[in-house]
Each structure stands twice: as C-alpha cells, then as structure tokens.
C-alpha cells in the first residue's frame, strides 16, 4: 500500500462482528475501479469483531484495522480513523449495515471531481425512508429540529453516519465527544461550505443499537450548549487552500 488512495472510508465498530463482511463486500463492489482504503475502528469490542476484521482483510487488501483498548464512542472512532487515513478525502459510515456502501461514490464525487470548489469542506448525507422504529424516528426528528433551531446549520439530518469531508479541514476542528453529530455546523462555522445529498437507509443487519433514545437526548442537551459556545468562540477567518500557479 504505497500509493496514496483517493479516499478513505472510516467505520467505527463496537460488537459488530456479523456486519463486517457485509460492509467490506459491499464497499468492494460499490467502489470497484476506484482508489480507496477502508479503516475499521474496533472501539473496545467484547465480541469477535477484531478477529473477523483480520480474516476479512485477507480477502480485501484495502481493509485496515485500528483498535481502542476500551470503548471511546463513535466520535473517538471517527477521530482515530481520520488521523490514520492516508487519503485527502475521508468518508464515514456506521458499522451496523444501515448505511448502504453504494452511497459512498455519490458522497465523494463533489469533492474529487474536476473543478471541485476549493472551499467545499463536507458533503453530508441525509437519510430518506428511514428503516428505524417509530420512537427512534420521532426522537431523531425532535433532536434535529432543536439542533437546527439553535445552530442554524441548514442540515435536516445531522445524525446520518454517511459523510465525506476534507481530512485536513477535519483535523483543524476542535475535538470533543459526540462531535460527529455536529460536523456540518462545525465545518460551516470554521469557514467551509457544506453540501447535502439524500441517501438511502437500511434496516440494521445484525446486532443491537448502542444508544437509547433517553440517553441520547440527555447527552444531546449538554452537547448543544457546548457547541453553541464553541461556535461563538470560533476563529473568524481561515486561508483558502494554496493554488497551483
């Protein structure tokens, strides 16, 4: 693996042993002919996630693994994966199989196509026809509405795991727990343009959710207060990427 890939797909995983092959096979098919790598971040799993990733990597040479000795959460997984990524563009997706790999080429296209805007920082997916329980959809709708009202980030569904962004721009952002849910607002606040595309959504393939509606709501209140404060304290300017003369 000496050539720099065009993009890196980062997938945080905790106890997702039964979803690994599905995701790897799906990415191999969806991104065939493209230069890419996949980093699966084993976030302190207590099942056979790490062993299954190792076995799957024997079939898919684009696959790499990072391990957390203990669980740090989804944002920690994204953070570790982005810092380990070799590509200038990073895509994220959830490890539960609900984000179809076929959406990845559509996410990266606006960032890698000829003439891509130099100030486009992130392309955020927004789920349509969600395959979740009614209570989860209502909780997400309420949380997204509150967040949009407070942050004015123009994003309908910031909880979608499918995102593509510039690695260098992400690394410049302040890191905090649950930051993955506020990436459009953070990119916008730090001077980058944000694009959105509608993406499909699937039912969970295997395993169980790591979140509860109540727990997510309580944490979300603290997160929102912190993000509002952080954005108010942001840098006002940043330089555009250097042009080739």
Image (cartoon, rainbow, N blue to C red):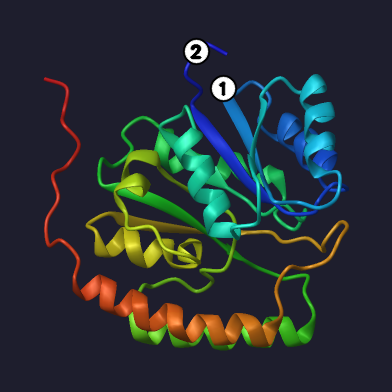
- Label 1 Cα neighbours within 10 Å, binned few <14 / some 14-19 / many ≥20: some
- Label 2 Cα neighbours within 10 Å, binned few <14 / some 14-19 / many ≥20: few
For the point 51% across and 44% down, the residue is 80
Horizontally, residue 164 falls left or right of residue 167, namely right
Q: Secondary structure at mark 1?
A: loop
Q: Which residue is mark 1?
A: 35
Whole-percent x and y of residue 231?
26, 71
Q: Secondary structure at mark 2?
A: loop
Whole-percent x and y of residue 148?
41, 81
For the point 14% across and 50% down, the residue is 238
Whole-percent x and y of residue 138?
67, 87
Residue nearest the observer in this picture, 97 or 210: 210
Horizontally, residue 123 falls left or right of residue 78, namely left
Compared to residue 86, the image places residue 67 above or below, namely below
- What quarter of the picture does the N terminus occupy? top right
Horizontally, residue 197 falls left or right of residue 205, namely left
Q: Is residue 23 visible?
A: yes
Compared to residue 179, the image places residue 149 above or below, namely below
Mark drawn on residue 3? 2
Quarter of image, res 141: bottom right
Quarter of image, res 140: bottom right
Whole-percent x and y of residue 136?
72, 81
First of labels 2, 1 by sequence position: 2
Foreground disc of the pair 2, 1: 2
For the point 40% across and 63% down, the residue is 184
For the residues bearing labels 2 and 1, Cβ distance under 8 angstroms: yes
- Residue farthest top in this picture: 2
Using the numbered discs, state the Cα–Cα distance from disc 2 to disc 1 in whole angstroms.
Answer: 9 Å
């Amino acid at each position: 693996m000496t050539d720099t890939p065009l993009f890196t797909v980062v997938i945080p995983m905790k106890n997702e042993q039964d979803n690994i092959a599905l995701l790897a096979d799906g990415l191999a098919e969806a991104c065939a002919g493209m230069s890419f790598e996949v980093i699966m971040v084993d976030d302190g799993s207590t099942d056979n996630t790490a062993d299954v990733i190792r076995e799957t990597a024997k079939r898919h040479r684009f696959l790499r693994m990072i391990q957390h000795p203990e669980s740090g959460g989804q944002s920690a997984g994204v953070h570790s994966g982005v810092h380990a990524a070799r590509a200038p563009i990073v895509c994220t997706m959830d490890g539960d199989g609900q984000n179809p790999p076929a959406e990845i080429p559509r996410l990266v296209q606006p960032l890698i196509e000829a003439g891509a805007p130099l100030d486009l920082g992130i392309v955020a997916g927004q789920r349509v026809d969600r395959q979740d329980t009614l209570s989860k959809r209502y909780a997400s709708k309420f949380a997204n509405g509150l967040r949009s009202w407070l942050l004015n980030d123009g994003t309908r569904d910031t909880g979608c795991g499918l995102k593509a962004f510039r690695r260098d721009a992400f690394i410049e952002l302040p890191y905090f727990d649950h930051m993955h849910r506020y990436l459009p607002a953070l990119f916008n606040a730090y001077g980058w343009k944000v694009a959105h595309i509608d993406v499909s959504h699937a039912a969970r393939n295997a395993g169980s959710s790591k979140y509860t509606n109540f727990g997510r709501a309580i944490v979300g209140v603290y997160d929102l207060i912190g993000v509002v404060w952080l954005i108010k304290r942001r840098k006002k300017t940043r330089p555009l990427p250097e042009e080739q003369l």
